[in-house]
Amino acid sequence: MNAVERFRHYFEQLQPADLARIGEVYGAHAHFRDPFNEVRGLAAVRRVFEHMFETLEAPRFEVLDAFGSGEQAFLTWNFRFRLRGREMQIHGSSHLKLAPDGKVIYHRDYWDAAEELWERVPLLGALLRRLKRRLRAGS
């Protein structure tokens, strides 16, 4: 199994107990960034995922596409979870940089926090949707 397949498998099967072996996938000094976090080091990356399991109900990743070339990889995914009993989904992508041993040393997630989360909040969502309509080309 190559590094991209190993990463994909790890994340599609991820459960809280799997965090004990996160060092099999990430390098000791890995850099992780998403719209809410920017951390460095294996322990800090692990804390991001621990927080995910503590905060969300039944979080899971579904990788739609994954490919790599040399020391870089890209994935598109759906992240599904429940929050206060409500089913949610975030669509996003990840850019990975790999060390020579195949471990992830850079992981950057790209997804639109406004569209995927904030627009679903009743009052804030209405305001953001109205602002988006006003800023849209041809409006």
Image (spheres, helix red, strand yellow):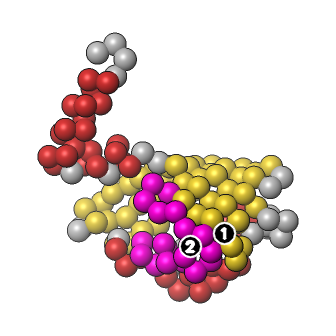
Q: In the figure, residue 43 lies in which quadrant? A: bottom right
Asked whether 19 or 44 is in front, the reply is: 44
Judging by the rendered image, the residue that carries numbered circle 1 is 30
Q: Which residues are magenta?
A: 34-52
Image location (x, y in percent) of residue 33:
54, 59
User: Where, quadrant-wise, is the N terminus in this rendering?
Assistant: bottom right
Image height of 19 relative to 136, above or below: below
Residue closer to the observer: 10 or 126: 126
Query: Circle 2 is placed at which residue position?
Result: 45
**Residue 121: image location, x then y, percent:** 21, 51
- Find the residue positioned furthest to the top: 138
Tell me the kind of residue under disc 2: Val
Q: In percent of the image, x 26 and y 23: which residue is there?
A: 134
Give the SS element for disc 1.
strand
Q: Amino acid at mark 1?
A: Ala
Q: Is residue 53 above or below residue 128?
A: below
Image quadrant in which the C terminus is located: top left
Q: Tell whether position 74 is magenta.
A: no
User: Looking at the image, which residue is at 60% across and 70% down?
Assistant: 40
Q: Is residue 132 above or below residue 54?
A: above
Image coordinates of residue 97 in percent, x first then y, are 72, 57
Q: Are marks 2 and 1 in contact (CB under 8 Å)?
A: yes
